[in-house]
Image (spheres, rainbow, N blue to C red):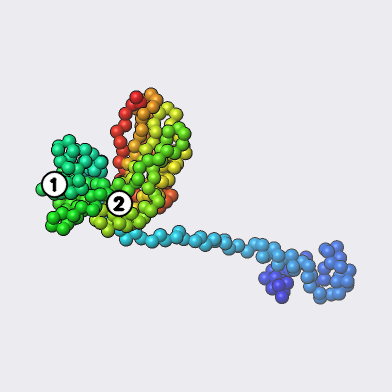
Amino acid sequence: MLAAQASAAHPLRPWQGTSPSPGLGASPASASQPGRPKVAGAALVAVAHFLRRPRRCMRRVLQPFAIEPINPFAAEMQANIKALGGNGLGLLDAEGAGKELSTCLESSGMDPSEENRQKWREFCYGLENLGEYCSAVLMEEEALKFTSSAGRTLPQILSDAGVMSAMRVDQGFVPLNSFGEKATEGIVLLEERCEDFYASGVRIAKWRTQVECNLEMPTDVSVWENTDCLARAARVCQENGLAFIAEIQTSQNTGSHSMERTSYVCEKATVDVLHVFASFKSTLTCWRRSHGTNSLGP
């Protein structure tokens, strides 16, 4: 059938008679039988016609990107981050005051009991027009247990003044290697703690990272470890409704180096943080970077 169609589509040339001579490739048997078509020649014509047909391009159907579930807290976290630096205000870091509070009360002749510490917090955080001087207050975990005489918690008192409550979610530094570099701990049980913080009224979480800075450090292992832990903490906090603040500290206890070296280390750490944040699919619009004071080597 294919040969017949090819013959109909491509009629034989004058020299291609129905009785081809043996010299054109036909067998003597076919040459001696008049009226028999040239089957071999017709097949070649059909193959040539098939090869001249335009080929269809085979398109690969690519799988679309996996659709990530939308964070239900995204709008709230973006509004909190925007309000954090609004009107030129910032974060009031009162987290370290809890450790020094007992000493201050003792030096003033007062009993450093929990009741007196709570009275001091109520006095400080209950000031009128506190929202004109700061947009958020970073507190310690002990302050969440505070309840005023009116039965209101400290985050509720701050919220009435237009101030957000922030909490440091890391649990300090631990040795990382023999070079004196440190890592941040607190990633274990962070999700459960963030859930409790959000239920208590906290809306901003802060995580600290310390990077050694001199002519030989930081090492790549230290930067990788700290930025990876920082990105994981950011994703856990954001999944539980807490906007994230990443504080990058540069420890300059050893070595003599220039300001350019310090700037390079800070830039390297910041770039790695952004890269790892994208790898962990953290929401970049729901976090802020806080950096310590940069200075020359001692």
Mark 1 residue crowding within 10 angstroms, few (<14) / some (14–19) / many (20+): few
Mark in front: 2 vs 1: 1
Query: x and y percent of residue 261 in the render?
Result: 38, 29
User: At 23% from the left edge and 49% from the top edge, which residue is drawn?
Assistant: 143
User: At 52% from the left edge and 62% from the top edge, which residue is drawn?
Assistant: 61
Contact between marks 2 and 1 (CB within 8 A): the answer is no
Task: Please say if 10 is above or below 114.
Answer: below
Q: Earlier in the sequence, mark 2 or mark 1?
A: 1
Whether residue 29 sits left or right of residue 158 in the image: it is right
Quadrant (top left/top right/bottom left/bottom right) for the N terminus: bottom right
Whether residue 3 sits left or right of residue 186 in the image: it is right
Residue furthest to the left in view is 128
Query: x and y percent of residue 122 in the render?
Result: 15, 49
The amino acid type of the residue labelled 2 equals Ala
Query: x and y percent of residue 155 in the render?
Result: 21, 53
- Residue 132, by quadrant, is top left
- Residue 212, by quadrant, is top left
Quadrant (top left/top right/bottom left/bottom right) for the C terminus: top left
The numbered mark at residue 123 is 1
Mark 2 residue crowding within 10 angstroms, few (<14) / some (14–19) / many (20+): many
Task: Please say if 183 is above or below 254.
Answer: below
Secondary structure under badge 1? helix
Real-space Cα separation, disc 2 to disc 1, in angstroms: 27 Å
Residue identified by numbered label 2:
243
Whether residue 117 sits left or right of residue 263 in the image: it is left
